[in-house]
Amino acid sequence: MADTTVTHTGQALARPAGLQGVAADWSSDQRAFKNVSWGKAMMWIFLLSDTFVFGCFLLSYMTARMSTRVPWPNPSEVFSLHIGGSDIPLILIAIMTFVLISSSGTMAMAVNFGYRHDRRKTAILMLLTAALGATFVGMQAFEWTKLITEGVRPWGNPWGAAQFGSSFFMITGFHGTHVTFGVIFLIIVARKVWRGDYETGRRGFFTSRRGRYEHVEIMGLYWHFVDLVWVFIFAFFYLW
Amino acid sequence: MVDVTPADAVPPAEVAEMELYHPHSWWTKYVFSQDAKVIAIQYSATATAIGLVALVLSWLMRLQLGFPGTFDFISPEAYYQFITMHGMIMVIYLLTALFLGGFGNYLIPLMVGARDMVFPYVNMLSYWIYLLAVLVLASSFFAPGGPTGAGWTLYPPQAIMTGTPGGQDWGIILMLVSLILFIIGFTMGGLNYVVTVLQARTRGMTLMRLPLTVWGIFTATVMALLAFPALFVACVMMLFDRALGTSFFMPAIVQMGEQLQHGGGSPILFQHLFWFFGHPEVYIVALPAFGIVSDLISTHARKNIFGYRMMVWAIVGIGALSFVVWAHHMYVSGMHPYFGFFFATTTLIIAVPTAIKVYNWVLTLWRGDIHLTVPMLFALAFIVTFVNGGLTGLFLGNVVVDVPLSDTMFVVAHFHMVMGVAPILVIFGAIYHWYPKVTGRMLNEAMGQFHFWVTFLGAYLIFFPMHYIGLMGVPRRYHELTNTTVMTESAHDLNAFISIMAFLVGFAQIVFLFNLIWSIRHGREAGGNPWRATTLEWQTPETPPAHGNFGKELPIVYRWAYDYSVPGAKEDFIPQNMPGSFGTSREPA
């Protein structure tokens, strides 16, 4: 096997506890993060970089919102749906958030079953995660359509500051793109699990490397990150 | 915890051998190659090619500045386009790509004792996306309206307005798309470099045994992964402002008596985003240079680097501090004046670790067995140049000094000295140093000496007078300055002199390019370790290193990278993979 997760030294690494253990790891040879595979380390560092991207987006949006002299549209009114004779604020966003958070749950279960080599359950749970993700994107498309029919454009809207529409489409669009990529890769990894690639050591089409069940977990890291980012977008864009 | 003593006990391998992709055809071996060494050459060649374009652009600017009114084809619009493209290409597409994509790819796996980067396929994609970014950028020369003339910092609102060349044409769009592509491509490569250093070192290679070259490139890559997001976001937002008519950066504007559609945006926001990337970018270029120059000096002075640990912590400290100094580029932008106090203070604090590094280089040279080889000459020239550029940086870091000097040629001279000439000198030195490993042959010494002296002295003849005319008040970014009070007769003469020197230095690079090509066939055979250096890349079984770098067995590291002239040892260098105990090493315990 190529890059391995676990330590195959034949002897357990005796590590001091706490901060001393951290210092020992960082002053050791070969690896700074013991028992962390290359793929997982790479995903964590990518997510750190991506955090800065979303951080910059959100900070820019907050700057725009605070510095504009035109009133900001009231999110509770803009994002309300007319159901059963009354306007319910943020109802769609609440459902979307519920769906996305639930998909994190199914993803976590998929990781668990993956490490138990339960191919069927892993694949089904991943596909379920992908379905929930696709539902989220679908509801987002509905939300966009509704706002566009009401006259919201990136360059202006009927209720107030033009930056409302610009920030909204940019930030939710960028997040939706992340979810969409996640759905695509979830389906790819689910297919590999289903086919048993990680049991037979079948090589990747592009990379010509063998995969492992850890890929499910790395996929999960990305997915949970996208969820977490949504929580911040929810808090800063819809609740503020 | 496994206790590692320098001489013997090396912990067992934690990670199984990496599985390499073995190319089957010429295409997968040399074009769509997954070998970091080939990718490094591809990166370097592409960066050099686009860098030569930027060099020609600087000549065109100097033609106009030195001899105003003589060349009709250089219109004010064309001049601004030259400025913009010259700056952006040199900073991002040449220096960043060459240091991280070029030297990073070649040296990191070899120096840490890995067979390749951890994800060679992603690494390959990184290069091809970089190439795409370069092609998109270059295509703007042929687009209607030409490339953008917004100045290399692309400040809004003027960057996307009519009247600015490329502002309402394709120029600015292609520039922003190219930058976005560059950042995506770089992220793919950068993740590889970071994970390779952290997780794929060979047995015995602790972080505190890494050559400083790797420390410099590693820290710069981490910084780039955290700084480029700001540029990415700024580019996306400006692209929306230009293409969709949003107003992130566009305030209410009246142009030619007409109120524009834009309104309510903040141009200063762009400056903050741009410089949150832009200042770390200075050190993304400088830190690899710091690292490489440390290794050149130690090897060619046959002495261990002075204060290795201090050097490492200085690199890390500079990297961290560079994220809290960005607004010193914005003293005259109209931001809150109190910010100036904070950013001036942090700016001056960053001089401390930088000065530590300079002192340590000098102390490494102290009583060393200095060989004045071409790489060493370039390394020494770097120290001098960096001190010069750094000192003017102290001037400009102070608000009260910066305000009158801002937007004069003094600033141009300062940043060309510190992040133009200084890193380029290191790149030259590094090429003369590692060329024998890449090709198996030495670069021609006579041509190298000629190249060095013309480049080094020429750079000073260009930029020293530029400081002077800047102090006289000659502003930068002006197409033509005839008959103004600041442009005295002598300032005109100096401008003409600077231009002639710029042509000379530029032409001298032809000797270097010729040397690069000529020496592949006609250079002296180098052998595996011509400089008698300690680091792992010189200990490979084949030169140039084969696919997989180290033959059957990965090297095991028993010592740090700086065991030169160890008292009591037979040879004046002890390779890192040499077992046993010799004399009294200065390796920190």
Image (spheres, grey):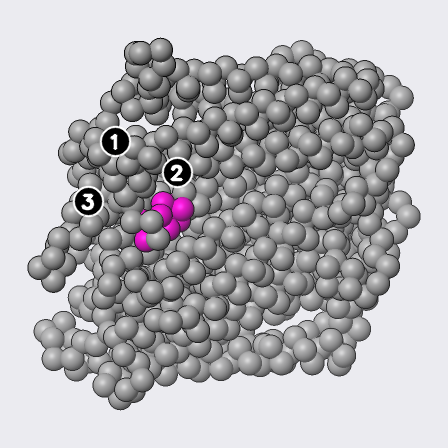
In the rendered view, tell whether residue B393 sits above or below residue A89: below
Mark 2: amino acid? Met
In this orientation, which residue lies closer to the viewer: A83 or B157?
Answer: A83
Q: Which mark is residue B157?
A: none
In this figure, what is the number of numbered marks?
Answer: 3
**Lateral position of residue B108 relative to residue B51, left or right:** right
Can you give x and y, in whole percent of width and height, for residue B255 in the image? 14, 59
Residue with the mark numbered 3 = B263
In this orientation, which residue lies closer to the viewer: A142 or B485?
Answer: A142
Can you give x and y, in whole percent of width and height, for residue B528 in the image? 81, 62
**Lateral position of residue B321 relative to residue B482, left or right:** right
In the rendered view, tell whether residue B491 sits above or below residue B344: below
Label 2 marks a residue whose chain is: A
In this orientation, which residue lies closer to the viewer: B164 or B58?
Answer: B164
Q: Quadrant of the N terminus of chain B?
A: top right
Mark with earlier residue (1, 2): 1
Q: Which mark is residue A65?
A: 1
Please tell me which residue is depicted at 89% across the width and 21% down the height of the picture. Answer: A10
Label 3 marks a residue whose chain is: B
Crowd tier of the residue under label 2, counting other residues whose Cα lies within 10 Å: few below 14, some 14–19, many 20 or above: some
Q: Rounded to the nearest whole Å, what is the CA distance between mark 1 and mark 2?
A: 14 Å
Residue with the mark numbered 2 = A170
Mark 1: amino acid? Arg
**Same chain for marks 1 and 3?**
no
Can you give x and y, in whole percent of width and height, for residue B47 in the image? 56, 64
In the rendered view, tell whether residue B496 sits above or below residue B41: below
In this orientation, which residue lies closer to the viewer: A169 or B162?
Answer: A169
